[in-house]
Amino acid sequence: MKVIASLGLLILVASVFLGNPAFAESLDNIRISVSNYDGNSATVKITWNHDDKTTNYKIGCVSCNPNTEKFTTGDSITFNNVTPFPNSSSAMLYVITYDSENKIISAKQLIVDLGQ
Amino acid sequence: MNQEMVVSYRQDSIQEDGMLFVRTEGIPPTMIKAPIILAGLIIVTAAIPLQNSFSSTKALDLIIFQDGSTHVSSLIEVDPLEPDFTVNLFGNSIDNLVAIGENDFLLYTETIGSSALVETFGSSTISLDYDTHDLVSKEGRIWTFSIQAPSDYTLLMPQNSIIVGMSALPQNMELINEQTKFSFQNGSNEVNYILGTPTSSQPSSSEPLDNSLIFIGGAIASAGIIGAIFLRKFQRTSKKIETVQTQKISIETPDPETIFRLRPNLREDDKEIVNFIFNNGGQALESELRKKFLQPRTTMWRAVKRLERQGIIEIVKKDLQNLVKLKGGLEEEN
């Protein structure tokens, strides 16, 4: 009985947290789309879930030479001329979220296979 | 025939006003050869210490840990005829230096500043391992790894690191157990990173799942289960079985202020740990503490044991991990 009760509770909690986007933390859901890859560079669009606590987002490309970075207050950004690492089709990007006091809330690394 | 001995005097060839004639035909070649001989001597002299300390790095692997220390593993080729050689280390703060020769012989080493003297013991290949604290620095939340590498090398980044910049692009990159491993060429390089939650994302253009279905399913399942629990409770009470009420005695967990009052000699860093555990609901995993305070395993273990000795916390095993709980009923020290 206890097992069933625990399972039910787990499902309830999971459904509340997964089903309701209001409970999603900053950068919980990130979506990436790649276009215009010509073997050298591509356009990458990154979209993330909205978070009220976040006031600013910093997005950067580490595999680009030289490294590039952009700031936005919105929930998506488009990066042009994203290049992969040499001898590879993987590009390395990152997203950092900042609060109103410009302190880092969270950060995530994005490794994107541009060839896919 | 009579022999007569006549004394004859040698006639001086040089008169008072005479000239000195010297053979000059050998001088020009000698003058040309002198600088060559001198240069040769200088090269030979310079080459002697080089031969003594001849070594070349065959492989260099670096692992960065979450506390900012770096483990260096290198494979060095040396002249086996030389009794020892000097190798440059990455920094002055060196720990756990171990040199192993061929046939797994442990070799004698002596650290002098940022270099080490290693006895070869006849080995031509030596593996050198050590930890250094000078390759990584931290400013705010940004960690910076800086190196001037004498050879190509691999770099394994710490777990949960998010790389936000690098001055040299790697030749190769791979993911090993959620850790990023780079292969870099020799030369100077700088890698900036922060510690957070990494994710390996592939591009996706599909719409996210309709979460309302999960929500409805969860709600139905929960309602059913809650109903089942009530039904079972009702059945139990209808049987009118006498039950003995057990009185739960709860010992209140003291707040940090009380703890600090009862233990006035507590260290500041220990106080921070107590505060964190209290704000975390009175308990925290030791791994969480390490992550929070960016402390190595041994340092945190010592801190936790210190708090346990003072009766502030208790350590409970939970899923092969140490769960650190604030202890109730703390009394004043005698």
Image (cartoon, rainbow, N blue to C red):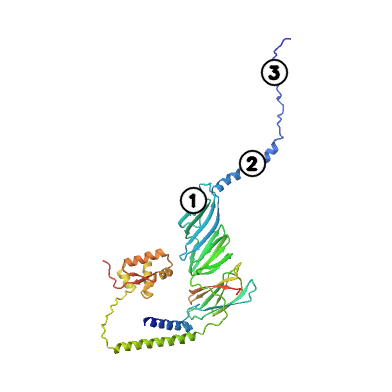
Work out whether residue B132 or residue B202 is closer to the camera in this orientation and state it: B202
Could you say where residue A46 lies in the image, as x and y percent from the top left?
Answer: 56, 77
Q: Residue furthest front?
A: B239
Amino acid of disc 1: Val
- How packed mark 3 is, by other alpha carbons closer than 10 Å (few <14, some 14-19, many 20 or more), is few
Q: Which residue is mark 1?
A: B118
Q: Label 2, label 3: how many angstroms apart (C-alpha)?
A: 46 Å
Amino acid of disc 3: Tyr
User: Which one is closest to the eye, mark 2 or mark 3?
Assistant: 2
Q: Does residue B257 appear left or right of residue B48 in this picture?
A: left
SS at badge 2: helix
Quadrant in the picture for residue B328: bottom left
Q: Are marks 1 and 2 in contact (CB under 8 Å)?
A: no
Chain of the residue on which disc 1 is drawn? B
Could you say where residue B223 lies in the image, as x and y percent from the top left?
Answer: 41, 88
SS at badge 1: strand
Chain of the residue on which disc 3 is drawn? B
